[in-house]
Image (cartoon, rainbow, N blue to C red):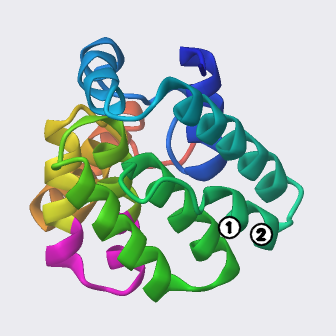
Amino acid sequence: MATANDRAVLQTIFNPSTPFGDIPGLDDEEEEENAQEEAFAPELLEQVQDLELQGVSAAESGDLNTALQRFNLLPERASGYNNRAQALRLRGDVAGALRDLDMAIRLSRGRGRAACQSLVQRGLIHRLQEREEEARQDFERAARLGSTFARRQLVLLNPYAALCNQMLCEMLGRLRNPDGSGNE
């Protein structure tokens, strides 16, 4: 079974734009995820988790085809779809990644770590596709699940917050340098 640190490392590998260890509500989620995973035979679950770690190693070394094979695991397990979506995205298959993220969110019932990570990743893809409203909705859901990264993205998507931040920076600049000489 992966430790909290293992999961933080995996989170960083597959979601490099999130802060290290941004795993929301880890303790609360573990209880829910353990209950969901009890539906699988322990031996099978352990084998699947080992294959996922092999997939992560393959993805780290750039072997996305092997990673994708390792992530084609239990069709009822949300984290496998989230992991596979990251490999698909790295391979340039954005449509496939979105399908897998949708499935991960559906399987997780929008709760827990897999849902939070999937919502953040889907939100980032929506932002890259300039689908700001869909991105905002995903980031809001992920923020409610505890993602600090999603909260920061919401601020960036809010034009009033951006304007306020710009005005605040200008005001602080004037306070630091009231004569406008440029020397602080």
| Magenta residues, dominant SS class | helix
> Residue at left 61%, top 58%?
71
Q: CA distance from mark 1 to mark 2?
A: 6 Å
Q: Quadrant of residue 30?
A: top left
Q: Position of residue 120 (x, y in %)?
A: 35, 55
Question: Can you identify the residue that label 1 sits on?
Answer: 68
Are there few (<14), some (14-19), or many (20+) residues within 10 Å of tag 1?
A: many
Percent across and percent down for residue 105 are 26, 57
Residue at x-position 55% and y-position 50%: 15
Query: Mark 1 or 2, which is nearer the eye?
Result: 1
> Where 85 falls versus 46 (above or below)?
below
Q: Is residue 3 left or right of residue 62?
A: left
In this picture, is 174 found above or below 133?
above
Magenta span: 122-135
Which of the pair 17/160 is nearer the observer?
A: 17
User: Residue at label 2?
Assistant: 64
Q: Is residue 44 magenta?
A: no
